[in-house]
Amino acid sequence: MSSLALSRVHMQHWLRGGTVQNRVLKRNLNLLEYQSKKLLEESGVAIQAFRVLEGKKDENLLKDFSVKEYVVKAQILAGGRGKGHFDNGFKGGVHITNDTKEVLNLVDKMIGAKLITKQTPKEGILVKKVMVADSINIARETYLSIVMDREHNGPVLIASPAGGMDIEAVAEETPDKIKTVPISIVEGISKERAEEVARFLEFKGPLVEKAAGEILKLYSLFIKVDATQIEINPLAETDDGRVISVDAKLNFDDNAEFRQKDIFAMDVHEDTDPKEIEASKYNLNYIAMEGNIGCLVNGAGLAMATMDIIKLNGGSPANFLDVGGNVKEDQVLKAFQILTSDKNVKAILVNVFGGIVNCATIANGIVNATKTIGLNVPLVVRLEGTNVHAAKKILQDSGLKIDSAEDLDDAAKKAVRSLN
């Protein structure tokens, strides 16, 4: 696999939250398929015509939607929908039909039921919307993506004539079918370069110009919405001579939320823990686990170290909540409220290394939070760093039942022991 392909794999892993550390550092904006297609359509990118229904009551939306064949797709944040099944016994989250009445019957069977696929929780995800699209006839599938790549310090276009399949497998097995094109963030991509990519994708004749036009529109959208990735798989050639973005995956830069409020307002939280959503409102990062010791930390590395040492001492983390480096007292209070809202939490371990963060601020926040919520589970606190001595005095003088620890190992032992 080429270094760029590897870089892309790592970027995908990072964006999708493949590890605990990554999930702490990145809150993903999740859009349903129809939402991504709407963004493409608004930028002039050629897509399948579609309608979105929430039940039979929306049948009027199909009156002016006359196509030869419909593809009916349940809208959830998971792959493998076509091979999935619903908790009501209905099979398949993707169906094709040419009968409008059958479209409505399919929608009725999907809405309000939970779709279970290889990528959903065991209980499935509730379907609230169904996309009904024009079922185009695909003559050929290609792959196109634009990603922000650290190695190239900017956008990189990745293209392959082998679309409709796992691009990582293509890169590994047939690297000659992968083309990478670094793009100047200042100059953008020229029409000539876009046509060069179109020819690499094996478009012929007038389709070269059409495909190049789609590439230019996709790059324009990439910049406009502060995307970190736009992946089109497949970018299809139809049997009637069109170039269509059939499936789209978009990721966005969280730091640009202030510029992209309309897009971030579309965020879908259907598979997200409500406590994680609540934490994000206060610039906190929360991750649920399966144990019974709640962990309040500052920093992803410290979070993982804390969990490891709890495990080594025979305990199990129920969750962890990262307060970051600029935490304020009110955020500490919110952190405790979120941690204790988990009924599995039987003890709390606070492990903070004060660099940028002031330990005294944490200590005052702990005292205030403990009094405000009437904490009734054991609390072990390990603080180190800026103003640590003042912080320890604040805890000691509070008169509260707070077990101070000398180091992380001591803290983990005390937290585990407090459960007995």
Image: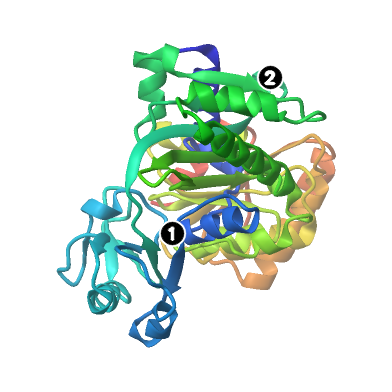
Outermost residue toward the bottom? 57
Q: Few, some or many C-alpha atoms within 10 Å of disc 2 (few <14, some 14-19, many ≥20)?
A: few
Residue 47 shown left or right of residue 69 in the figure: right
Q: Earlier in the sequence, mark 2 or mark 1?
A: 2
User: In this orientation, which residue lies closer to the viewer: 255 or 297?
Assistant: 255
Residue behind mark 1? 271
Residue 195, given in percent of the width and then of the height, sits at 60, 27
Residue 114, given in percent of the width and then of the height, sits at 29, 68
Q: Few, some or many C-alpha atoms within 10 Å of disc 1 (few <14, some 14-19, many ≥20)?
A: some
Q: How is the image coloured?
A: rainbow
> Residue at the spot x=39%, y=50% of the render?
291
| Element at label 2 | helix
Residue behind mark 2? 152
> Residue at the spot x=39%, y=78% of the render?
62
> Residue at the spot x=43%, y=59% of the render?
271
Q: Amino acid at mark 1?
A: Asp
User: Would you identify the image quadrant in which residue 301 lies?
Assistant: top right
Q: Amino acid at mark 2?
A: His
User: In this orientation, which residue lies closer to the viewer: 400 or 91?
Assistant: 91
